[in-house]
Amino acid sequence: MVGFGVSRWVAALIAAGLLETTSVGEPLVHLQNVPDQLILPVPEGNNQLLTASIHGKPALRVWLAPTRESELRVPLIGIDDQLYQINLAESAVLDALRRHSGEPEFRVFAETGEGSIVESVTVRYLMCAAPLRLDLESGVLSLLLSQRSITSLPGSRGTLKLRLGDITSGYVSLELSQWRGESPIPRTLAREGDTLQFALAEQQYVLHVEKMTNVLWGEDYVVLSVSSLPTWNRQSIEQLLQAIAKVDATFIRNDQQLPPAQFAALLRQKLAVAPQARISVDDFIEQIATRSSTTGKTYEIALQDGTVMPVADWLRQQRGASDRDSAAPPSTLHPD
């Protein structure tokens, strides 16, 4: 009786001109059990069944997808010749929609024996799980944020919130959290120059505290950047190579003196043939810029003040890691 009632309802809409169909007998996709507000992921331990009834010719395939052209397809299970179901709590649904970078919506599609595809009405949802990776068009995201502010992290489709506290004694409290699940960056104290790594399902990222400013009037603010870990490594290595090429010093390789530009070119050649697909900054310093690959002798730099030191130690100083690692955070922190 339920199926008969639905068929009569669909037929009435077609007769009234309120529902279009390309040809008589072509399938029509009607959805049942659509919640008024669909929040993904569905809370753990719960089910959210969606039923699609196909009216007209039998369908060869029925699937859920964000768009007709999308390859992010999740098949529905056939109950009989007309009814198909899917549990929106399934991980396959969540994974497919987390990969979708467009509008938060999907449809159910059905393919006929003639190869034509028909679709249901649009179902909108609220995605609360962090995406598998950030949508960073240029590879690097720059942010200027006031202290004591909360903002959605661009590229996260509103699922990740970046929270800043007061700027106090050169430090700021910082947290990157999502609505459900663990925080990619738990609340921590950071200061200018610090880098914080965090991971999503398919990519690692670096949040860099580039600048903190205290102003006489108005709100203090922080300048941050977010980039993927490979992008961060490439940029950081390039900065070190540029520092080598511009320094007023002499480099010593296998007891021979090299000018800065020539030594930088040598390291670029070694970097180009490095076996690692994604070499890190530490890999560059420890494996590329430390010693000769032919003799094993340590590379050295002779500075203008007469100081001679291993190139690797000098590069670590350029990164400023030793100063940040030795600094202690303030003993008190103003509440947010």
Image (cartoon, rainbow, N blue to C red):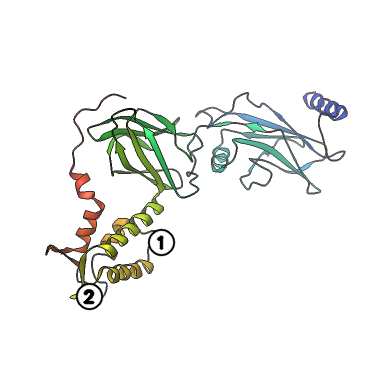
Quadrant into which the C terminus falls: top left
Q: Which of the numbered marks, if any, corresponds to residue 295?
A: 2
Left or right, 305 with respect to 200, comes to left
Q: Is residue 153 above or below residue 139?
A: above
Which residue is nearer to you in this view: 67 or 25?
Answer: 67
Which residue is nearer to you in this view: 209 or 38?
Answer: 209
- Residue annotated with mark 1: 277
Q: Is residue 284 above or below residue 335?
A: below
Q: Is residue 131 visible?
A: yes
Q: What percent of the width, then of the height, locates residue 315?
A: 24, 58
Please give the name of the residue rendered at 28% of the width and 29% of the height, measured from the top-left corner. Answer: 216
The picture quadrant where one finds residue 37 is top right
Instruction: Say if mark 1 contacts mark 2, CB within 8 Å.
Output: no
Secondary structure, mark 2, is loop
- Which residue is farthest left? 306
Three-letter amino acid code at the position of disc 2? Thr
Quadrant into which the N terminus falls: top right
Please give the name of the residue rendered at 22% of the width and 32% of the height, measured from the top-left corner. Answer: 169
Q: What percent of the width, then of the height, locates residue 272?
A: 38, 68
Three-letter amino acid code at the position of disc 1? Ala
Which residue is nearer to you in this view: 305 or 128?
Answer: 305
Left or right, 25 with respect to 180, comes to right
Left or right, 4 with respect to 298, comes to right
Mark 2 residue crowding within 10 angstroms, few (<14) / some (14–19) / many (20+): few
The picture quadrant where one finds residue 94 is top right
Please give the name of the residue rendered at 34% of the width and 30% of the height, measured from the top-left corner. Answer: 147
